[in-house]
Image (cartoon, rainbow, N blue to C red):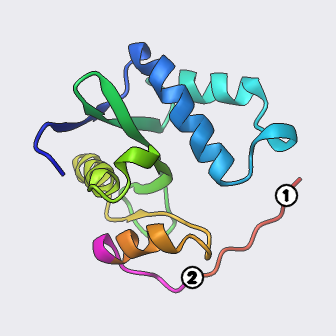
Amino acid sequence: MSSDLIIRTVTPQDYAQWLPLWDGYNAFYGRAGATALAPEITRTTWARFFDAYEPVHALVAARGDELLGLTHYLFHRSTTAIGPNCYLQDLFTSEAARGKGVGHALIDGVYQRAKLAGCLRVYWHTHETNHTAMRLYDDVAEHSGFVVYRKLF
């Protein structure tokens, strides 16, 4: 990764470059075409990043004027700690940026902000078939061994 990569908080002016990254992330997880997110979900997600009352945050990786990746994270309470936890919900880099340390830098950016917020842990999920990402995750965190269950409504 080159030293000119900057990890920073997203700004309203980033929308035009954030949106293709967000769309790419959603397409990767099969949320495209007929199964795409409703536009109001994207609009609401974007608005939450700039609402001081929302616990949802976004970072971007930038080189010059170009955005190379994004991560979204949120703080929440826990029954097992007094301080908040940090859930890293979304992480995505442009195809051209993959394997160049951008994902690692974005995760480090979340780690820094979680520490500042008093979090004791950062955690995330990935699909069991996402082997490329799991190689990175194995370098930056510990696999907890937990299995995720869910019920959709």
Q: Position of residue 31 (x, y in %)?
A: 74, 46
SS of the residue under disc 2? loop
Return the residue nearer the eye: 9 or 75.
9
Specify few, some or many for label 1: CA neighbours under 10 Å numbering under 14, 14-19, or 20 or more: few
Badge number at residue 34: none
State the residue position of label 2. 146
Magenta segment, which residues? 139-146
Amino acid on which disc 1 is placed: Leu
Q: Position of residue 111 (x, y in %)?
A: 28, 55
SS of the residue under disc 1? loop
Q: Given the current orientation, which residue lies at the most extreme front position? A: 96
**Relative to 103, is 75 on the left or the right?**
right
- Would you identify the image quadrant in which residue 125 lies? bottom right
> From this viewpoint, is residue 123 visible?
yes
**Relative to 42, is 151 on the left or the right?**
right
Dominant secondary structure, magenta: loop
Return the residue nearer the eye: 119 or 93.
93
- Would you identify the image quadrant in which residue 81 lies? bottom left
Q: Residue at x 31, y 64 (%)?
A: 120
Q: Position of residue 27 (x, y in %)?
A: 67, 46
Q: Residue at x 45, y 48 (%)?
A: 95
Q: Position of residue 57 (x, y in %)?
A: 43, 36
Badge number at residue 152: 1
Of marks 1 and 2, which one's residue comes earlier in the chain? 2
**Relative to 5, is 90 on the left or the right?**
right
Q: Give above or below for 43 relative to 100.
A: above
Count the marks: 2
Specify few, some or many for label 2: CA neighbours under 10 Å numbering under 14, 14-19, or 20 or more: few
> From this viewpoint, is residue 49 visible?
no
In magenta stretch: residue 145: yes
Q: Residue at x 36, y 38 (%)?
A: 68
Q: Residue at x 63, y 52 (%)?
A: 28
